[in-house]
Amino acid sequence: MNDNFVNIKIDREERPDLDHIYMDAVQAMTGSGGWPLNVFLTPDAKPFMGALTFLQDVRIIGSSWMEVLLGITQAFNERRNEVDTQAENN
């Protein structure tokens, strides 16, 4: 994760303001909300992808956490315009 991402953990009880911003974004993207919340942001802090949880077990969600990270990295590097468009729409 550290090769391609800046990882930040936000405590929803200490920073409910930030939690609210990112929860609203994920709800807009996916139609649901909850925790644990995972959100991916552009370098200018605009959310472009998020989900409640990613499990290690590929049988459950169809993709492992590493596959999700690799897919996001690939999209960011190869289809940046689509990532930016998604971020602007949230």
Image (cartoon, rainbow, N blue to C red):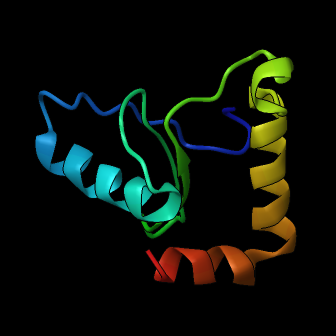
Quadrant where the C terminus sits is: bottom left
* In this view, 49 is above or below 88: above
- The location of residue 2, given as percent across then percent down, is 66, 33
- The location of residue 35, given as percent across then percent down, is 38, 29
- The location of residue 15, given as percent across then percent down, is 15, 38
* In this view, 89 is above or below 66: below
Give the quadrant of residue 5. Answer: top right
- The location of residue 74, given as percent across then percent down, is 85, 57
Residue beneath the point at 84% across and 36% down = 67
Residue beneath the point at 64% across and 29% down = 54
Q: Is residue 34 left or right of residue 6?
A: left
Residue beneath the point at 83% across and 43% down = 70
* In this view, 13 is above or below 57: below
Q: Is residue 33 left or right of residue 53?
A: left
Residue beneath the point at 76% across and 30% down = 61
Quadrant where the N terminus sits is: top right
* In this view, 81 is above or below 66: below
